[in-house]
Image: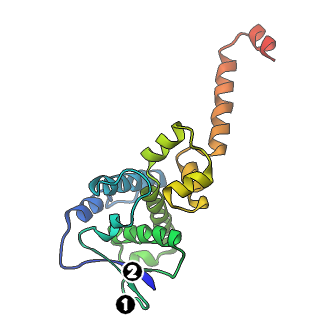
Amino acid sequence: MANRVGAARATKPALLARLRALEPTWPVAPAERRWITERQAALLLLKSDTLGPPIPNRVVTELEGITVTESEQLPKGLLGASQAPPLEQRVTIFHELKHVIDGLSAAHARRASHRNQCERSCEHFARAVLVPAAALHADWQAGHRRIPALARRYQVSESLMAARLHELGLGAKAIGARRAFCRAVTRLGRTKSERRSAR
């Protein structure tokens, strides 16, 4: 059975309206888009009283104005998830919620450049909700740095966890770059004789 996420037409829910209000009406740069998406994810989690992992699907299923049902066939106009494994279904539910939040017109979404940007934003939103930045930073500071263990803790795939670590600057490449930067800064502060003796 496929999941479908759709906005209820009869109500004007307060949280959904607040999430939509964070979306600007003018074009934004990719960095701004990521920042807005992070704010939307944080607001959704805050208002659903869910801040730590694993993030339950009820964050969407209990959201006023949103209907998530299981169906063999999806009615026209509703967003859906394929018969995917449970971890992928979790990602898809939050990904599709971002589409509902953005409320894009069909004509707007047909433009390939905008569609790609929109899909990247939806993928980022799903990662940001399922792996909240504050919780992941706290786990990282506590020494939990193995991707498989973090993925199990947050109930996401290892590839999603690796992508989220990279987004937050916590991945292996980011750590290596920070170490190189720190070494360079340390070398700059030394005199020539101190640098020679350090080698």
Location of the C terminus by quadrant is: top right
Q: Is residue 114 at all visible to an observer of this figure?
A: no
Q: Is residue 51 at all visible to an observer of this figure?
A: yes
* Whole-number angstrom distance, CA of label 2 to CA of label 1: 9 Å
Q: Which mark is residue 75?
A: 1
Residue 25 position, x and y percent, is 31, 61
Classify residue 100 by image quadrant: bottom left
Q: Residue at x 48, y 73 (%)?
A: 89
Left or right: 70 as drawn, with respect to 22: right
Residue hosting label 2: 4
Q: How many marks?
A: 2
Residue 124 position, x and y percent, is 48, 59
Q: Secondary structure at mark 1?
A: loop
Identified by mark 1, the residue type is Pro
Indicate which disc, 2 or 1, sits on the residue closer to the N terminus.
Answer: 2
Please state which of residues 118 and 47 is positioned toward the viewer in this rendering: 47
Left or right: 134 as drawn, with respect to 21: right
